[in-house]
Image (cartoon, helix red, strand yellow):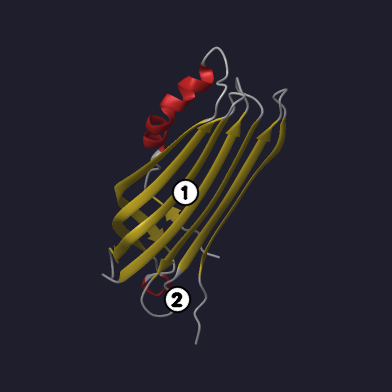
Amino acid sequence: MHKIRSTGRARLASAVALLAPSLVLVAGPAPAYAAETTTRILRAPLDLSVVLPCANGGLGEVVDFDGTISEVYHVTVDETGGFHVHIVETQSNVHGIGATTGDRYASTRVNLFVYDQGFGSLPITSTQQLVFRIVGPGPGNDASIRITNHTTVNADGTITVAFDTYTAECEPTTP
């Protein structure tokens, strides 16, 4: 199994900027009595370089991608002051060019993130599932990345569940 490394940076700053007003609501002195929900949609250019070991006849190469990333942020502060975030991130029209071969690639990605926090700060549950797929020309140039992580922190601050799984592999050549 080949490893695939991404040299792009996550857009954590944009998430914090979008969620900051809701965080202030949670940090207030008393919980709200009515649920308050905000939904924001963000579209931004995507510029990402990925080291793809399957490419170039198995010699690997850097593939430079561009396109659009769309993020839907759905934030709720519930009637008890709990804080809930659901983020769905997708790519559209994302294409790449191999730096060595000039081969053209297409990419799809779906990232689902759910975060729930009780009033004050605990308990917390956080789950993320990401599927990233790259399709290249001919056999042996396709790859997939799957990431799942989950954390649960109970009301007394004890971490009761924490795991990360990561797989990255080149798709087998089919005759």
Task: Please name whichever residue, 136 or 113, is drawn nearer the observer in this view of the structure.
Answer: 113
Q: At numbered mark 1, what does the secondary structure look like: helix, strand or loop?
A: strand
- Crowding around mark 1 (Cα neighbors within 10 Å: few <14, some 14 to 19, many 20+) is some
Q: Where is residue 81 in the image (x, y as percent from the top left)?
A: 58, 23
- Residue at 38% x, 56% y is 91
Type of the residue with mark 1:
Val
- Quadrant of residue 151 within the rendered picture: top right
Q: Is residue 158 left or right of residue 145?
A: right
Q: Where is residue 63 in the image (x, y as percent from the top left)?
A: 33, 61
Task: Please name whichever residue, 101 or 165, is drawn nearer the observer in this view of the structure.
Answer: 165
Whether pointer 2 and pointer 1 mark residues with C-beta atoms closer than 8 Å, the reply is: no
Type of the residue with mark 2:
Gly
Task: Please name whichever residue, 92 or 102, is drawn nearer the observer in this view of the structure.
Answer: 92
- Residue at 50% x, 83% y is 174
Q: Which mark is residue 140?
A: 2
Q: Nearer the viewer, mark 2 or mark 1?
A: 1
Q: At numbered mark 2, what does the secondary structure look like: helix, strand or loop?
A: loop
- Quadrant of residue 99 within the rendered picture: bottom left
Sequence-wise, the earlier of marks 2 and 1 is: 1
Q: In which quarter of the image is the N terminus?
A: bottom right
Give the Cα separation between the discs numbered 2 and 1: 30 Å
Task: Please name whichever residue, 109 or 10, is drawn nearer the observer in this view of the structure.
Answer: 109
Q: Where is residue 39 in the image (x, y as percent from the top left)?
A: 42, 39
Q: In this view, does 88 lie to the left or right of 157?
A: left
- Residue at 40% x, 75% y is 57
- Residue at 30% x, 63% y is 96
Q: In this view, does 107 lie above or below 152?
A: below
Residue where numbered disc 1 is placed? 88
